Image: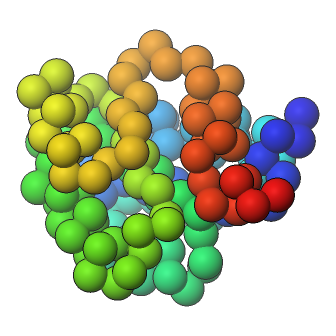
Amino acid sequence: MNKGNGIKVIVTMIGLDGHTTGGEVVSMILRDAGFDVVYLGVNQTPAMIVEAAMQEDVDAIGISSHASNYSQIEEVMDLVKKNNLEDVIVVCGGNIPKRQIELLLAKGVAKIFTPGSAGSEIVDYLVANTRRAVTQ
């Protein structure tokens, strides 16, 4: 399956969130689907994530969140805008409360994948919504 051919995605955890399984599984799913995955791992600050997005020229940033670090995700969105990266979509996944999902979406996060989301749903969303996919 090469749906993600040419699409480059960062997968990371933010702040002190040390829950790596979700991010690692999503990274494997995306790689298997033909995406170019840059796995940053844990303990990333919003500035580190956005800097990596610029250096790597990614199409999407994926944040796995299983801790109450939502203000840091909002900071990523602020830095995305500040650095004129509006064409880089930000998606999140994890155990995020419903009210917080609403706030993150209002802040500009493109999509939230909750537990139980199928890998194919993530792949299909990125294929349909990233800048490189749209121009191919």
Compare residues 27 and 136 and report the one nearer the observer. 136
Determine the residue located farthest toward the right in the rendered image. 1
Does the rendering let one see residue 103? yes
Compare residues 8 and 67 and report the one nearer the observer. 8
Q: x and y percent of residue 5 in the render?
A: 84, 53
Q: Looking at the figure, which quarter contains the N terminus? A: top right
Q: x and y percent of residue 133 in the render?
A: 72, 53
Residue that appears at 59% across and 69% down: 58
Q: x and y percent of residue 66 in the render?
A: 27, 36
Quick check: 64 above or below 37? above
Q: x and y percent of residue 7 in the render?
A: 72, 58
Q: Looking at the figure, which quarter contains the C terminus? A: bottom right
Query: Does residue 14 appear left or right of residue 1 in this picture?
Result: left
Residue that appears at 46% across and 51% down: 62
Query: Does residue 135 appear left or right of residue 97 in this picture?
Result: right
Determine the residue located farthest toward the front in the rendered image. 135
**Colour scheme of the picture:** rainbow
Query: Does residue 16 appear left or right of residue 118 in this picture?
Result: left
Residue that appears at 43% across and 75% down: 85
Quick check: 112 above or below 135? above
